[in-house]
Image (cartoon, coloured by chain):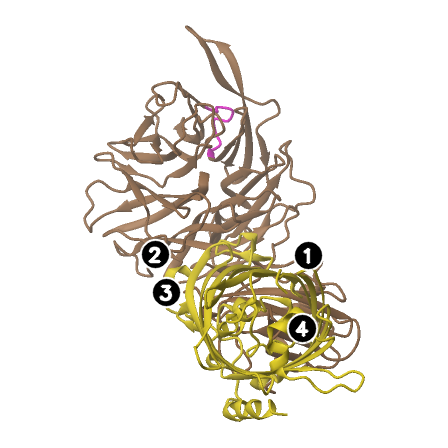
Amino acid sequence: MRSVLPAACCAFLLAGATYAAVGVTGAGVLLEPLSVRPAGLGEAYTAEGGTVEAIGYNPAGLAGLAGVEGTALVRQGFAGDTFASVLGGGTIREFGFGAGVAYLTTGSVEQIDPTGRLSTVVGQSDLVGIAGLAREVPGTPLLLGLSGTVIRSQLLEASAATDFGADFGAQVVLPRAGLRLGASLQHWGGHLRYEDARIPVDNNDLPLLVRFGAALAVAIPVGGSTIGSLESLESADIRESPPPHVGRVYADAILRRAENAVAYAGGLEYVYAGLVSLRGGYRILASGGAGRDTAWTFGAGIAFAGLRVDYAAEMLSFTALHRIGLTVSPKR
Amino acid sequence: MTRVWDNQGTYMARLTVRCLLALALASPAAAARWSLFPTFPWTYTRTGAATASDLVVGYQDTIWVAGTVMDGFAPTSGRDVVILFYSVTETGVAWTSTVAAKPLATALYDRAGMDEGPPQIAVAPHNFSWGNTEIEVFAAFTTTGEGQQELTVLRLLGSFAVAPSATSLSVSGYPCGAAGISVPESGTPYAVGWVTAGGVDQLFYFRQVRKNNTDFGPCVTATFWTGSVTASVTGRAIAVDGGGQAWIAAQWDRDIALFKYTPEVYQGTSAIELKAVLAPGWPRRFSTPEWDEPVAGRRDVAGNFWVVGSVDPDGAGPVGSDAAVWKFDADGNPAPGFTSPVRLSLGGQAVFYDLALDDSQNCYVTGHSGSTMVFTGYDRNGRVLPGLPIAESAGGASIEGRGIGLDSTGAAWIAATVTAAVPLSGTSYIALYRYLPTPEPAPIAPGEVRVRGPEGGVLNVVKGERMAILAWPTGSGDVRVQVRTLRGELIRELVDAGPGRQVVQLEWDGKNASGQLVASGTYAVIVTGNGVRATKRVVVVRRP
């Protein structure tokens, strides 16, 4: 219940932004999940940390990485598009760092040029590079992180655009409450202009996001034991020997500033003995005149010997998106 | 009338679109419409007068326009021949819309003291046996002055690096002139025209022997037909195939006549030479009660000989005529299945001046009817091609389409002469038109969905383009179109809730539900309804 209050505050702050203009920002590839686990949790991942997967939502989550970690994702889209990403991270002294690349290709489209010639070309291909780092502010429960993104987008095999963006994030870890709070600013940067900005009208803002989130982790009592605390779950001992039943709850509110839209997301995860994970999530996007977009998400993971295979399904109103991934984290 | 509602409840009538679509569906063949390409017509003016007489499309879609110019208001040397060179392919592949609307090069032929008549033009095939990599252009015209008339063949190279060279020819002092020219694979120009001998015009057939890549010299084969010493027989058009076989359309008094000359080798006084021999059973004269006048002719890929010109129904002469197209088969007989001549008149005297043939044996023609330029086309059976004819007018001026050619994209180029209503010096100029064929949406099958805009699957929102979404639901009920990002976020929703429709057409204008243009990128168009379900990709771009 303690996590409900911050989420409610966030929702209140964002309640005014109800008239959405979804679609007016470019670089839609930046809104893709870079790993599978967050996708199964409705992408309510702003407050999650200690994993390289956090770089897609809040770079402050890179702090507290247990060691070298890598993850990869691939998904086949409903429109014949394909997205893949690879992330890797680790620690250097007190810093956690992460980096990765992502690639989107949308498949071919038919194009008629001004002379009437019909040709088939790749509609769009985007390449994204991301790198970030984070650290704990000494003596405080505060984690700070930042990351940079570069995107190279090509349309119709003819027009290309390059842009840079920056993410800033913060997280507060409250061990006694079993709670993490997070906030981040994502994709702060310029404009994606194809044809090297020679066309003034081709001015596509990056999808600027302001995210707020909360995460609660609990040890689920089985057989009459008491509810565990975050302190115990976060401790090194517990990492070495996780409790048999762990539950996590996530909640996010995301302001899509350039689009004047608000999205909410929530997720639940149950982990058995650190080996098997079951996930569920829900997200909702208030997209103004077009109504509300909602989606249930489901996921699962199986971990063994430092490897984890993940699957996530995103149940859109008209189809389902499936993502699979592999995570390598030797120290986990 | 069905009603189309978008998600904002805005009512949009689509009756016109539906009617057109219904017509397209009823037609057994996919229709096409022709539209004048933006920035056209291009014009070429002089201080005096400029007139077009022919147009050909050469290798790499180079456009060659031949005509005459007369500068100033007190010309001293009469008309001069001008050849205009346009290139719309900077790299040989891609069209660039920034091509200037003026010729890239101009060649002017002015023989002192002479008046040069309207030239006919031909471009040598790029890969002829002499290996010249330059584009080679020949023009044939009549030169008049100093009490004589001559047939002149002008040769110039596409680069204009070589000064124009010309061969002028007269026959035993008889006046003669040119009316048509053809350059087959050999790169040798063949011209046809007339020679006035014995008081009447006779067919004059001219072949300029090519000695090597640059030397056309004095090697000339010329003959005129003396089969009739009383009739006037004037060569009007010539088409020569790779074997040197020449088909000629001639005006025989008031009839059309066809001549076929075949090459024959013989021992000359000092060397083996070539002469043209009239094929047995030729010429063929086609007598009718009307006055038939050929103007131009070409052979199609099947060997048929198409001739265009005019027909005067009352037989009183070429006044008040209809524009006409004749088609003859490879044996010189009227082509079966084609009722020659096919006529056209949109009011006033009408003439077809030139024709162009595509590989499907369709014939595109241009000319004029009254004061309007006419562009039309006929299929192999003489049926008017869909979307044609087009009549082009220019206020009080008259326009005559004088030359037509097809480029590699199927677009039709027309060189026209525009003349002001009051014929003063300096009031005519050359106008170049380019018509682009646009296929209509082909009939779709039940359960099928098609998404297409003016640029195919590409939607240029800056130009205000719209993406047409066609669906043929097999059941009753709404057809719903959702435009979504590739992440699945809803951008726009369109619903056709009209009853009783067979084919649904909706349009997406590139805007989201808030009426804002979406960003450049790829979007998914999802069409669902009774019996239809499809997801199509659309790429939104912003190009000025």
Circle 3 Cα neighbour tier, 10 Å, few/some/many (<14 / 14–19 / ≥20): few
Image coordinates of residue A41 in percent, x first then y, are 65, 76
**Taking A326 as reference, is A225 above or below it?**
below
Q: Which residue is mark 2?
A: B419
**Front label number (1 vs 4):** 4
Horizontal relation, residue A89 to residue B17: left or right: left
The alpha-carbon separation of the residues under discs 4 and 2 comes to 74 Å
Tell me residue B96's x, y (percent): 41, 53
Dot 2: within a 10 Å radius of its alpha carbon, few (fewer than 14), some, or many (20 or more) residues? many
Say which of marks 4 and 2 sits in front: 4
Residues tagged 1 and 2 counted as in contact (Cβ below 8 A) = no
The amino acid type of the residue labelled 3 equals: Gly
Residue placed under numbered mark 1 in the picture: B29
Which of the two discs, 1 and 3, sits closer to the camera? 1
What SS does tag 3 mark? loop
**Is label 4 in contact with label 2 (beta carbons under 8 Å)?**
no
**Range of residues picked out in magenta:** B224-235
Give whichever of discs 3 and 2 has the lower sequence position.
3
Amino acid at pointer 2: Thr
The residue under label 3 is B396
The chain to which mark 2 is attached is B
The structure residue drawn at horizontal position 42% and vertical position 6%, both measured from the top left corner, is B269
Chain A on-screen colour = yellow
Distance, label 1 to label 2, CA atoms, is: 38 Å
How far apart marks 1 and 3 lie (CA) works out to 38 Å
B229 in the magenta segment: yes
Under tag 4, what secondary structure?
Answer: helix
Around disc 4, counting alpha carbons within 10 Å, would you say few (fewer than 14), some (14 to 19), or many (20 or more)?
Answer: many
User: Distance from label 1 to label 4 (Cα)?
Assistant: 51 Å
Chain containing mark 3:
B
